[in-house]
Image: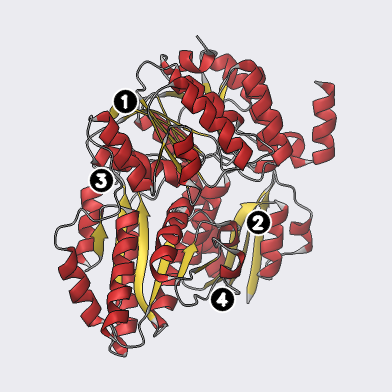
Amino acid sequence: MTKINELFQEKLKVINMGLESFNENLKKQNVKTVQVDWKPPARGNKKMLSLLDKLK
Amino acid sequence: MVLKYLIRENAYYDSVTLMIITREVKKIEGVKEVIVGMGTELNKELAGNLNLLTPKLQKITPNDFFISLDSVDDNIAKKAFAFVDELLSKKKAESEDYQPSTFESALKYMPEANLVLISLPGKYAAREAKNALLNDKHVMLFSDNVSLEEEIDLKSLAKQSGLLMMGPDCGTAIINHVALAFANVIRKGPIGIVGASGTGIQEVTVMIDKLGSGISQAIGTGGRDLKAEVGGIMMIEGLKALQNDPLTEIIVLISKPPDKEVARKVLSILKEGGKPSVVYFAGGDPGVIKEYGSIPGLSLEDTAHKAVAIAKGKSIEDFTGFTVTNIDKIIQVETKKLKEKQRYIRGLYTGGTLCDEAMIILSALVGDIYSNIPLKPEGKLSDINKSYRHSLIDLGDDEFTRGKPHPMIDPYVRQERILSEAKDKEAAIILMDFVLGFGSNPGPAGEMIPYIQKARKIAAKDGRHICMISSVCGTEEDPQNLIEQEKKLKEEGVIVMPSNAQAVRLAAAIVLSRRNSQ
């Protein structure tokens, strides 16, 4: 069975990154979620970000 | 003029929250202009255009929160700043749960997570999506402003790993009966959907529900999936998953006209699977669809009708009519109310695909249509803020939403636009969509009512009546409740049709009846 078909048989568990309203709506549907308190990495500095990615 | 600003370094809030706060603060008497936002290039540019940019603000980063405000005096500025804090702390109080600060820490907290929903600013979104895929998680990527190269890269990686990569720019999905981002509450049933259009999926799923059937899954792909460059990667993977899914008996595909080769590839895989299918390629060639043994949908509504007919074992017929019984009477009454100069339809849409569907139906019935998203280049409005003849406007398009929330969340753009349409002596009919479901405004009909009343007053000043026709894309189980929203509109004399296609056909019938009576 493919992973997508496996997903169809599981309970949805969601990591939400971005609009908190999406997370609230999932909670209203009794979905287990975690909201990431996201901030732009490297303080939004593009050059620094690409350096960080290279270090990974 | 008193210009005041405030900067808080390293304080991040999402853009929709801040755009809504900006609108609330602007309502305070004495506030002339205001921006509450993060220090992105776009926000700095918008601040510059409003004369709200100072040298210090010019230096802030996308990680810094700012308020810049022009008001009549110091007291108003103080009041406004305090109000922003009040709204922000209210927001914080709503979310008391633990919030990890990175994807990695979220993964440690909930290793069993199976899907990551991403709606971050476009320039960071692809990076986080890739990270999720590399950690074996399915992804729904709501964000736009992700490059085509990044999309191809993400979808290729997902395909290789057997994962869903819905998006970028994927507004709607229903997986395992959970509405993700902008989606409605739809009953369970045998119809599985893969769609490259958010409001397209919403209208078809809602119509399926209204017709008494239901869905197994609704997979979104993002609008560019069927372009030659992307090659329909996610539509094909989604389609295969539905073919292997025992709960899916009928497959529905929805997209804008796809690349010809990609269309053939998708249709041949659809044929191989052997499950009955209905395909809506907006404005595309139905012949190709038939050639591959599938049934072409003529509109979003017709697509739903045909899928439900298959599900119920009924005969499959084209549906291009009305389900409202007294339609001739409505046409007659409304036509009589119009003045001689009132000849044109003005569509004020929040759903892009609903606007597309309207243009396709209408151009076949009444002729040339003008728009900000025209079917043909010659139909492009020279000024998107001013309608010309029959004009259908997608108010959710980028040109209207720069630095503002989408009109399905905040109806501000449409509230303004309906008033300017009411001033136009040639406007006969105003067509509107109201999209319900999770993600959308909690009361879209109520938000428009005061402006519908104002528009009527403007027209009445010189003895005109404007015919208002709408359709509500939603179900009785949606948080906003279909019946309640329809009732509000009906009480204001707005004609509420059961689908966008029927609303458009009614508008055309009135215009044609007007022509014939002259």
Q: Are marks 4 and 1 on the same chain?
A: yes
Which label was assigned to residue B6?
2
> From the viewer's perspective, is the residue at label 3 or at label 1 nearer?
1
Marks 3 and 1, how far apart at CA: 24 Å
The mark nearer the N terminus, 3 or 2, is 2
| Image x and y of residue B230, in percent | 66, 35
Q: What's the mark number on residue B72?
A: 4
Answer with mark 2 or mark 1, whichever residue precedes in sequence: 2
Local crowd at mark 4 within 10 Å, few (<14), some, or many (≥20)? some
Left or right relative to B349: residue B312: left
As drawn, the label of residue B54 is none
Q: Residues within 10 Å of mark 3 (few under 14, many from 20)?
A: some
Check whether the beta carbons of the residues at disc 3 and disc 2 lie within 8 A of each other.
no
Quadrant in which the N terminus of chain B is drawn: bottom right
Say what amino acid the circle numbered 2 marks.
Answer: Leu
Using the image, name the chain to which the residue with label 3 belongs.
B
Residue B481 circle label: 3
In percent of width and height, residue B489 lies at: 25, 61
Q: Is residue B293 left or right of residue B263?
A: left
Residue at disc 2, secondary structure: strand
From mark 4 to mark 3, how far is it between C-alphas?
42 Å
| Residue appearing at x 61%, y 65% in the figure | B377
Type of the residue with mark 1:
Pro
Q: Tag 3: residue type?
A: Asn
In the image, are marks 3 and 1 on the same chain? Answer: yes
In space, the residues marked 2 and 1 are separated at their CA atoms by: 55 Å
